[in-house]
Amino acid sequence: MSHDDPGRAAHHEPYTRLVMLARPGAGKTTQADRLAHHLRLTHLDTGALLRREVESSSPLGLTIASALEHGELAPDSAVMAVIGPGIDDAVSTGGYVLDGFPRHLAQAKALDAFEPASSRPQAALLLEVREEECRRRLLARASLEDRNDDTPPTIDRRLATYELEMLPVLEYYDNRGMLVRIDGDRPSELVTAQILDRLGH
Ligand code: AMP
């Protein structure tokens, strides 16, 4: 197995269950959306599903609301309750590109314990963009979008949380031969092309 191309070497079937990992602001959602479109998979955007749950003012939404507002991770049980049915639905219609989950090691392990086993991810794409560039993009987005978690203090907290929580996740996927590293620091169309190429499309 070539070291720099683990997912592809280990896998021969078309990919239908992918996770997309990246720092906040790296373009994860844009790329997950395009990838899902190209591969005819469902894009599961965890942050968007959580925000929708909050807007619905359901009891579940209330347990998520304050975490979202403060740029902190929502409780695992609530997040699983929101994305679990999404994963089931997506698998029954061909597969998924999961965006925003896992955010820490326990979530990665929970996903790998998901039943049935045929709904677990096959590869994890890591979109690599430097922290400073992500901060710059998030600050630019803060002035354009009405997302109350895009303020300088929450941006810093989200970037710091990523560093702390995601390193073990990257190691976990790397050790399982599932991690596919993508250079995200280039024009977004080229990033998409690179992802498709690495997946053998
Ligand atoms: P995002 O849209 O991915 O930037 O996520 C927005 C917010 O949703 C995050 O700051 C967290 O509060 C929450 N969130 C998203 N994904 C997760 C997750 N996998 N686990 C816990 N909280 C999450």
Image (cartoon, grey):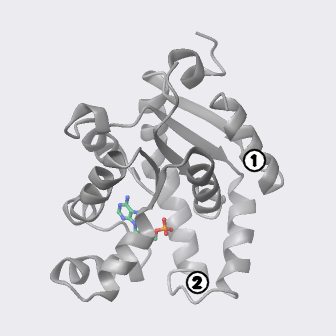
Marks 1 and 2, the one that precedes in the sequence:
2
Residue beneath the point at 67% across and 30% down = 198
Disc 1 residue type (three-letter): Val
Q: Position of residue 77 (x, y in %)?
A: 19, 60
Residue pointed to by mark 2: 151
| Nearest-to-viewer mark from 1 and 2 | 1
Residue beneath the point at 65% across and 83% down = 142
User: Hey, which residue is sitting farthest top in the picture?
Assistant: 1
Q: Position of residue 4 (x, y in %)?
A: 66, 21
Disc 2 residue type (three-letter): Thr
Residue beneath the point at 31% across and 68% down = 74
In the rendered structure, find residue 16 and report the number of the disc placed on it.
none
Residue pointed to by mark 1: 191
Give the CA separation, mark 1 to mark 2: 27 Å
Q: In which quadrant of the rendered image does the N terminus lie?
A: top right
Q: Position of residue 134 (x, y in %)?
A: 69, 62
Query: For ligand 1, which image quadrant applies?
Result: bottom left
